[in-house]
Amino acid sequence: MSSPTARLSRLRAAMSAQGLAAYVVVSADPHLSEYLPQRWRTRQWLSGFTGSVGTAVVTADQACVWVDSRYWEQADAELSGSGISLMRAGADGVPEPGEWLAKSLAHGARVGIDGQVLGLAAGRRLEQPLIDAGMVLHTDADLFDQVWADRPGLPTEPVYEHDPACTPRLRAEKLQAVRRAMADHNAQVHVISSLDDIAWLTNLRGTDVDYNPVFLAHALLDSQSLRLFVVPGKIDAALAGRLAEDGVQVCDYAGFAAALAAIEPGQRVLIDPARVTRGVIAALREEVVRVEAINPSTLLKSCKTEGELVHVRRAMEHDGAALCEFLHWFDTREPSEPITELTIDEQLTARRQVRPGFVSLSFPTIAGFNGNGAMPHYRATPQSHSAIEGDGLLLIDSGAQYVGGTTDITRVLPVGTPNREQKRDFTLVLKGMINLSLAHFPVGVPSPMLDVLARAPIWAGGAEYGHGTGHGVGYFLNVHEGPQVISWRATPSPHMAMRAGMITSNEPGIYRAGQWGVRIENLVANVAAQTTALGEFLRFETLTLCPIDTRCVLPELMTETELAWLDTYHAEVLARLSPLLAPEVQQWLHLRCQALAPRRSATTG
């Protein structure tokens, strides 16, 4: 493999041939996916930085990569010696890429980017500072076809139907629900490029993107049919016949631009500017009326039905049982047995793989010991990982895809003898997680407003963390989905309103660079709480089932309410997981689910 320096040289030569003063490389594909097919991992190929999010900018004499606080330490290490500078996005004084370019280049400079992977909304944010500085953004050049000699092609794995036993909402029902929303916007055609929306709408799944059971496709929906544009051969004749019964026509992926160009002038076309790219919709004629609004399917799929939640609860039980088997192994292994962060992933994945309905992991397992746990999105590799030995904390963030649901859980385990400061951080994070778990709130409250509930105990302890507290989770779909997000840094919008059936992560944390990290994460579902004369209220049902290691807790820092929540949670974990476990693991689980409140009373009485 060539070095980043050599790759930068080839890219700069291609830029020069095109008359470009700078080239922008975003972490995206034509569907704005979070996890990318190999073909579009251009920023990773160019820079060597392997995080899932980041933007590279290359000029004739400079190269930079912008990443948020989750990846600062990782990017600093991976970019070392590459000739590429790290830009800590979100830090004081760090400009956005567009602003940086506007200040770094001469008036009239030409900036290039592949418009096929540039989100419509993101493109507007990038372009405006350039326009203000008298520069031009060119979006018609994918230079990586020239400089990446062995660039992968499009994936060809088959598309399959989601198990009908796990799909309470029929395809025809979903299509009609989206059409009703289109009618509300007076739109005759709806353009859909986001893969999870298409997979949800069609009840189809695939393996084109690591960790997310989706497939490459675009779609055009009108009042009569859905045209589904996929790579030829991915949908067999039998499945195509079943799709046709619901008015779904299978078309060639390469024909999408021509289909957009054929939309008649005056037609009203619904597009979500956050979920389509500038290059993809460039084929639309100027006379077509663009109606910009959130994809109706994004809102519809975020609210899981009770039938779907039944499957999710069962998937959580099996996932929790796999975790308990792993934790039992971790606690009872021979002390002399050497293990590393890589061992954690291997052992945990092996136990998930044999559980009913398992399909794949839902994201790369994060297993970080001590200082590595302070990097929220750390990933151990064969080239760089730590042995688990001595004293400290081991953070494990993992999840799986089951045909009946998607899981995401973080637990922190004591190794040897954690010190009091580590236990204090653990207890503060636990208090924050419990505080949010106990929330009751009005239907429709903007999800970012709830963030203070999780952070209040952590702030009171003099700590803070840089990531959001919660993200939406799909139903055998993407582990990260919208529209809700629990983060005070997010700008509240009507689309972020909390509604019944939404599944969201609850994952506060504290990270001390180079020392340790603590994050405790459960998934929660919005369920009805009560209806009064003053409103309709929701609460969180905790879905995740796995003991929280009380060996890291300082009970004297917790309130009676917090202790009661923890003991009640552990009682439910014990009751629901025990039938799925072997006797020796059941015995271990009884020990890990012992109540804390009586023990505190005994020591303070």
Image (tube, helix red, strand yellow):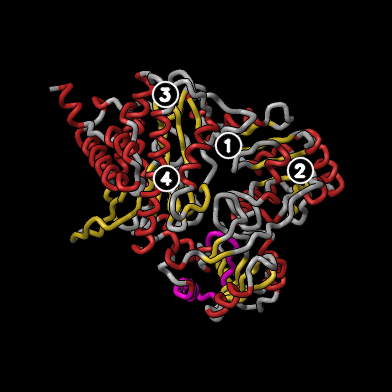
Instruction: Note whether residue 464 is visible.
Output: no
User: What's the amino acid at mark 3?
Assistant: Val
- Dividing the picture into quarters, in which one does residue 82 lie? top right
Of callouts 1 and 2, the N-terminal one: 2
Q: Give the range drawn in magenta.
A: 172-198
CA separation in Å, label 4 and label 3: 27 Å
Classify 10 Å Cα crowding around label 2: few (below 14), some (14-19), many (20 and above).
many
Q: Residue at x 71, y 57 (%)?
A: 154
Residue under numbered circle 3: 415
Residue under numbered circle 1: 89
CA separation in Å, label 3 and label 2: 48 Å
Secondary element at image label 4: strand
Comparing labels 4 and 2, the label whose residue is closer to the camera: 4
Of callouts 3 and 2, the N-terminal one: 2
Relative to 285, is 298 above or below? above
Residue 185: say if magenta.
yes
Residue under numbered circle 4: 470
